[in-house]
Amino acid sequence: MKLFTKYYKRLRISYIKVIILAAIVSAFFLPYYIEVESTGDNTYMVILNGVECGTVANEEEAEKCLREARKIVALQSEELTFMEIDMELRGSEVMFGILDDRGDVLNNMTKVLRGSVEESVQSSYLVKVNDITVCLESKTQVERLLNEAIDQYDNENKFNVSLAYDPNRELNVLAAQISTTEELIAENKADDFAMNVGAGEQLDVILDESSLTEKKDFEDYDLGIKEIGFVEDVEVVEAYIPKSELTDYETALNLLTKEQEIQQIYTVVSGDTLIEISNTVGLPLDEIIALNDSLESEKSIIRVGQELIITVPEPELNVEWQEETYYEESYEEDIIYVDNDKWYTTQSEVLREPVAGYRKVVANVTYINDTVVEREIIKEEIVVEAVAKIVERGTITPPTFIKPLSGGRITSYFGKRNISLKGASTNHKGMDWGTPTGTSIYASSGGTVTTAGWLSGYGYCVYIKHANGVETRYAHLSKVLVSRGQWVEQGQKIALSGNTGRSSGPHLHFEIRVNGKAVDPLDYLD
């Protein structure tokens, strides 16, 4: 019994030693255990974007690790980055909590964030002109684009565009400034001048300079481009945008400075003709006719207020520039008009033909792109004086005339024509509308019927006499509905169309005569 007790004591001591050794080993090699009180969740599993990253002691530690992980990812890129972040903390209450090493948790979170980085954004410059916006990656590119726009016209490379912050706008808004070296030098000289001379001396110098200007000869002018700028407002704003939204430089250049096909509407005004409209908008007449279904030819009738489609190629960013230039040219004096109160405004007669003159000129010419919009003559020397054209013109407003039928297709215009019909004139006195027999014919203007019946080559016809020596004629009718001496109102039905007399098919022949002379009906029809 005594031996057993002694053995038991030795065994007990060995057991205690083992327990102590195990505790020491656990302290160095096993996870860290903490004893906690029962106060609710006291360990938290960090789940970032659906991935478990490790366990921490509290929510503050998780947030701190997230901030550090975001900072690490952001510092690895020179540009701004957007990343998807969805952190979930799964809490639990334990008596002894196992916490992961903080460095391991941070590394795990950093890896997850790297994999969730969305598209990087970078500093860029948004250039807005009208409704067009392009995004360029640098200020240098914007300045290069704007300089290329003016370099098309600045052949001397005298001007330069730079960007500067607009003091009247927010801090990130820049304005395009166009300047020359000469202007900068002039500003410095002006400051020095103001400091060194009095107001009276300045006034004397200004007066002297103005008097010298009046005495300038042609060779004294400093010719060349004086001013240049943009017609539209150019807005430049600094911004951060994704790389995918940047505009390629050549694309941006084409969008803003190259001619684009822009469809526009031209509204006809009093005195317009198709040829004049063609010259005004710089578009060939055949193209205008092709764009507008209402126009059949250059002789088609146009009315005040009528809208015509025109396609004018022009860039989004237009450049206005002023050039002082010398040239010699033939010129004409303005036409001198002599009014005749007995004639219609459609009547005129040239009393004296013009003779062109010849002159030397220095002028300020203003352009928008390549189009001259204003010309101011600064100095002029007449070498050969021009003789003005003198035209006598009527002042009486003629009666209005309407188309004498509905529909119809123009088959022959007024004037010279080729025709195979035997006996028909090659000098057409009116105009023809092809239309089925029996179409209603109306009085083009109010007046008295002077002829109503058969008349040789005209077949059945109607003549109507109007005020001031004007007469209208309607020929090749199938039936006459009025009688000689009858008064008819404008638009009153007077006959039915046909194919009588010398005719090659059903149509209406219509004439307007002024004092017995046939005139082009298209010049009179409303």
Image: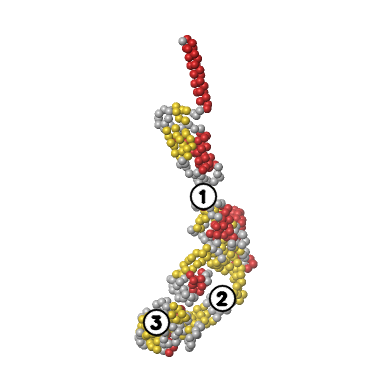
Residue ID for mark 1: 242
In the displayed structure, 255 sits above or below 309; it is above
User: In whole angstroms, how far apart are the C-alphas of marks 3 and 1?
Assistant: 71 Å
Q: Earlier in the sequence, mark 3 or mark 2?
A: 2
Q: Toward the viewer: 394 or 101?
A: 101
Residue at 50% across, 67% down: 311
Q: Residues within 10 Å of mark 2 (few under 14, many from 20)?
A: some
Q: Of the residues tagged 1 and 2, which is closer to the observer?
A: 1
Q: Residue at x 51, y 80 (%)?
A: 391
How far separated are the C-alphas under marks 3 and 2? 53 Å
Residue 434: x percent and y percent? 43, 80
* Residue type pointed to by label 2: Glu
Q: Nearer the viewer, residue 16 or 425?
A: 16
Residue 437 tag number: 3
Q: Residue at x 59, y 60 (%)?
A: 151
Identify the residue position indicated by label 2 in the image: 332
